[in-house]
Image (tube, rainbow, N blue to C red):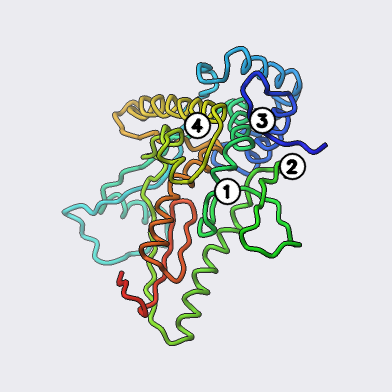
Amino acid sequence: MSYRAAFNGWNNLTIEDLLVAYRKAKADCFFENTFPTAIKFAEYEQDLLANLNDLLSRLKSNSGFESDEELLGDFRLLPKKLSTDRKADSTENGHVHFSKPERAVESLFKNYDITPEFRIVGDFPVDAHIISALWINMIGHQFDAKLDDSCYGARLKRIRNDELFAEDDDKPFHISSIGSFVPYFQPYQKWRSDGLKAIRYELEKDRDVIAVSLDLKSYYHFIDPMAISGTALLEALDLELTDEEKAFTEQLASFLCAWAKGAEKFGQSVGGKKAKISGGLVIGLTCSRIISNALLYRWDKLVLEKLAPIHYGRYVDDTKKYKSKRTSFIM
């Protein structure tokens, strides 16, 4: 009999559920280069069944994981970018390029005020990654299924049925695949090429096109994780969860909020100096990809219904819209 993931309460959770979640989590973390976790998984796998049974026992006895602070792991800072602000007394005119790195750096510091920017990411234990994958396997895939095809990035692997030709055929989550998500380079390339095809088609028809590109600045860092457990999002997605599934999702939201609060406290000081680095939705757990996409569902719907572009595509927090001047919309 094939495995089917369904959450019916913590007492009904099985070791098989955790094994499947572990397999997903291991593959997902292997392809994630934000923060290395290979050593943790290698150590965990030295006594895999014992570790999974211990996790299963804790989840059942504690009716979940919300109170387990050890799952929060540690906070890490990753360099994001260097912001530059031209000094008032700068003598540099136009763009200057130096072939010698030393001179380039000297000129940069002479003419600009430099501000380094960092982002906080989570360094989680393997158990936290397993719980994240468990939520996706049992609940998160339902959020992803509601998203439109205009959402390209961070999409789950689904089973294709090439014998059926209807566009609205249900494509179930591929629970037995290695890894949860489609590799990023395939949908990213398609996101770009589909937009260019739409532009090319309109230009071949001798129609003017307006192209708009938008990036939501620091999107993850301004997300309230509790939004995933609210009724407003479920109603917008037209998604019905069971009481047990809602309870799991609420625990996940509370867990992510606890991480965000810790991240904000951690980000108040960098290198002994005052700083302000917000936490928001954690970067480092796969469930965040599902949540970040689901929260933009309403945005996608508004763009498609109100603006009616000839093409619209979103890759996580990057969007592209193309509009022909044949319509009354002007951007």
Q: Earlier in the sequence, mark 4 or mark 3?
A: 3
Q: Earlier in the sequence, mark 3 or mark 2?
A: 3
Residue 122, which numbered label? Answer: 4
Contact? badges 3 and 2 (CB < 8 Å) = no
Compared with 184, 197 (above or below) is below
Mark 1, secondary structure of its residue: helix
Kind of residue sitting beneath label 1 = Ala
Residue indicated by mark 1: 145
Q: Give percent across and percent down for residue 159.
A: 70, 51
CA separation in Å, label 4 and label 2? 27 Å
Contact? badges 4 and 3 (CB < 8 Å) = no
Where the N terminus falls, by quadrant? top right
Residue indicated by mark 2: 176
Mark 3 surroundings within 10 Å by alpha-carbon count, few (fewer than 14), some (14 through 19), many (20 or more) = few
Where the C terminus falls, by quadrant? bottom left
Q: Earlier in the sequence, mark 3 or mark 1?
A: 3
Q: Give percent across and percent down for residue 226.
A: 42, 32
User: Nearer the viewer's eye, disc 4 or disc 3?
Assistant: 4
Q: Earlier in the sequence, mark 4 or mark 2?
A: 4
Q: Give percent across and percent down for residue 244.
A: 57, 26
Q: Is residue 287 left or right of residue 2?
A: left
Kind of residue sitting beneath label 4 = Gly
Res 286 quadrant in image: top right
Mark 4 surroundings within 10 Å by alpha-carbon count, few (fewer than 14), some (14 through 19), many (20 or more) = many
Res 101 quadrant in image: bottom left
Kind of residue sitting beneath label 3 = Ile
Contact? badges 4 and 2 (CB < 8 Å) = no
Mark 1 surroundings within 10 Å by alpha-carbon count, few (fewer than 14), some (14 through 19), many (20 or more) = some
Q: Give percent across and percent down for residue 9.
A: 61, 23
Residue 39, which numbered label? Answer: 3
